[in-house]
Every structure is written in C-alpha cells, then in structure tokens.
Image (cartoon, helix red, strand yellow):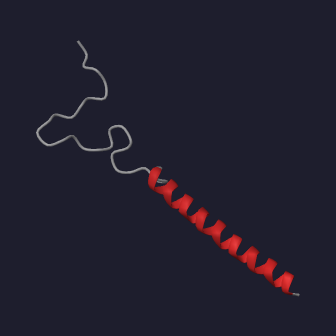
C-alpha cells in the first residue's frame, strides 16, 4: 500500500514539474515570437515619421 502511495505522489510531483516547464516554455515562446502581428510589422502599415515624406510604393514614372 505504501508503495502505491509513493508512486502516486511521485507521479503527481512529476506532473507538476512537467506543467511548470510547459508553462515556462510557452511564456518564453510568446515573448520571443508574438502570436499576433504588432503595429508596424507589415510593410506600409505604420505612418511616416514626422517631418519626412511618405515613401512611395511604386517608383515614379519618368
């Protein structure tokens, strides 16, 4: 009986450690690689800096 209790407790501790490692890994992954694009990630999505003309998307015709 004591052996079964020890195995259940060991399994519980191993589960908690695995869950903590998983949560830590997901937190690091979301910090490193955000799931949603941030403002200004896509080309042309952010406004031009103050005092500068916007960059044209096509070259001017000559």
**Residue at the image point whose x is 49% and y is 57% from the top:** 28
Q: Is 47 located above or below residue 52 in the figure?
A: below
Residue lying furthest left: 51
Question: Where in the figure is residue 35, as x and y percent of width and height?
Answer: 49, 54
Quadrant in which residue 26 is drawn:
bottom right
Considering the image in quadrants, where does the C terminus appear? top left
Nearest the viewer among 9 and 33 is 9
Point out the residue furthest to the front here: 2
**Residue 20, x across and y down, in percent:** 59, 68
Residue at 81% x, 84% y is: 5
Based on the displayed image, in which of its 4 quarters is residue 43 positioned?
top left
What residue is at 43 percent from the left and 50 percent from the top?
A: 37
Describe residue 18's horizontal placement relative to residue 25 as left or right. Answer: right
| Farthest-out residue, top | 62
Question: Is 16 left or right of 47, judged from the image as shown?
Answer: right
As drawn, 24 above or below 43: below
């Amino acid at each position: 009986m004591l052996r079964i209790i020890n195995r259940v407790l060991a399994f519980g501790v191993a589960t908690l450690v695995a869950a903590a490692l998983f949560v830590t890994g997901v937190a690091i992954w979301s910090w490193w690689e955000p799931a949603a694009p941030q403002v200004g990630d896509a080309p042309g999505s952010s406004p031009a800096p103050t005092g500068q003309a916007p960059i044209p998307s096509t070259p001017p015709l000559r």
